[in-house]
Image: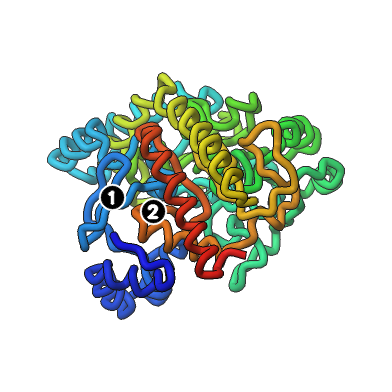
Amino acid sequence: MTINTLNIVDEYIRTHPGSQKLHERAMGFFAADGATHQARVFDPFRPYIARAQGTRKWDVDGNEYLDYVMGHGALILGHAHPAVVQAVQEQVAKGTHYGENHENEVAWAELIQRNMPAMEKMEFFPCGQEANMMAIRLSRLFTGRKKILRFAENFHGWGDEVVVTNTPGVSNDYVTMIPGHDLQLLEKELATREYAIVMAEGGGAHMAGQIPWDPDFIRSIPALARKYGTIFLIDEVVTGFRDAPGGWQSTIRVTPDLTSLGKIIGGGLGVGAFGGRADIMDMLKPKASPQPFARHSGTWNANPLTAAAGVAACKLYLDGKPQRRANELGAYLRKKGNQALKTKGYACRLYGRTIVHLYLGPADYEPADDSLPPTSDVAKLTSGAAQKERLCLHLLQRGIATMGGRFFVLSGMHTEEELDQAVDILISSLDAMSAEGSLT
Ligand SMILES: Cc1ncc(COP(=O)(O)O)c(C=O)c1O
């Protein structure tokens, strides 16, 4: 693709005629500016993808992208991994929905439990937020309490009680949001003994830790929650089996009462799951009235197609190879990227683990461990959305796909060469933004 930095929008439109046509058709159907997910609302439009393989995807105009979206974090084996493709192809010919129990749902649960032994019992859902919603329901039944304690910026889905608060149209009277890392405040709230559940995103707020947790803060939650009779859930929808076979919790050696999973456990098909302490999960067991129990329905729970993909993928996670590789690649991208950014004098920095976040600066200090951001100002970490959107366009036009220019999602299939390419293109995109005056 040719680049005219002074007019990146015109260049993008010129080189994406097929996507533009599809976008115009989509505008007639999808009220969110033609998009089917908030992250795909984009000015002028995101590319329409026709095919994906490994670490690459191609749009309807034949433009190739090195993919750092990785299915919103769902793909650590890359696109169309042969083992997953084979499992899905075999299953589709055997039927996609039996409306009955089947062997793969059991095999899948066994694999998940082998990865994460704290999942004493579990249940499957069509998506991650539903898993969180059921975790809230069971916690309420188990404790006889209604309230939910959550941390600022932590995202657990778009439903009323799981979305980031201050979202218009949301009714979540029973949710209290407190800032992270304030132990005193946490204890003060828990001590009211009104909370059924306290929830934290694995790794930190937004995609595994745009705002990272201090692991010591999370390590102090289980004892406090136990003291005041509140259930502690770690939401590992993004980090589960991405950071390590045992999830982020295994890397910091914390065992919550409940864990929610999603994305990666489905091998690229839609899924959610949650599980943990058998005594809490037993609230799903039908009981004689008037004892309470939760009913679990859902047409697509553990459907055979997703289960087949999940089993094939989870088998490959057990030895931790894809996770180790993705972590190594994350360290490589941070090192190479931060070197290049410093050399060019950009105060921007990369940090994170297998999802590498971009911080647009200013760098307040250089952390000893570059998996951490170079500022402790949480507001700065989430700022710069408009500039990141612009960067996203520059990256797309140069063949790099990201979610809104905010982070690079890695798989175990990316290569060092592809990361070098990403760094080169990140720098040339920032250069272009400086030249056009869109980088402050
Ligand atoms: C931490 C976290 N929890 C829950 C969810 C919701 O998962 P789903 O989109 O599968 O409902 C997401 C989605 O990105 C997430 O990042």
Residue labelled with disc 2? 401
**In the image, residue 333 lies at what x, y percent?**
49, 37
Q: Using the image, tell me which numbered label, if any, was put on residue 57.
A: 1
Q: Residue at x 55, y 35 (%)?
A: 335
**In the image, residue 234 lies at what x, y percent?**
61, 39
Q: Please report contact status of discs 1 and 2: CB closer than 8 Å, yes or no.
A: yes
Q: Residue at x 28, y 34 (%)?
A: 102
Q: Nearer the viewer, residue 59 or 41?
A: 59
Q: Nearer the viewer, residue 246 or 72?
A: 72
Image quarter for residue 219?
Answer: top right
Q: Is residue 311 above or below residue 144?
A: above
SS of the residue at dot 2? strand
Image quarter for residue 308?
Answer: top left
Whether the residue carrying mark 1 lies under 8 Å from ligand 1 is answered with no
Return the residue found at the far left. 93
Q: Residue at x 40, y 75 (%)?
A: 33
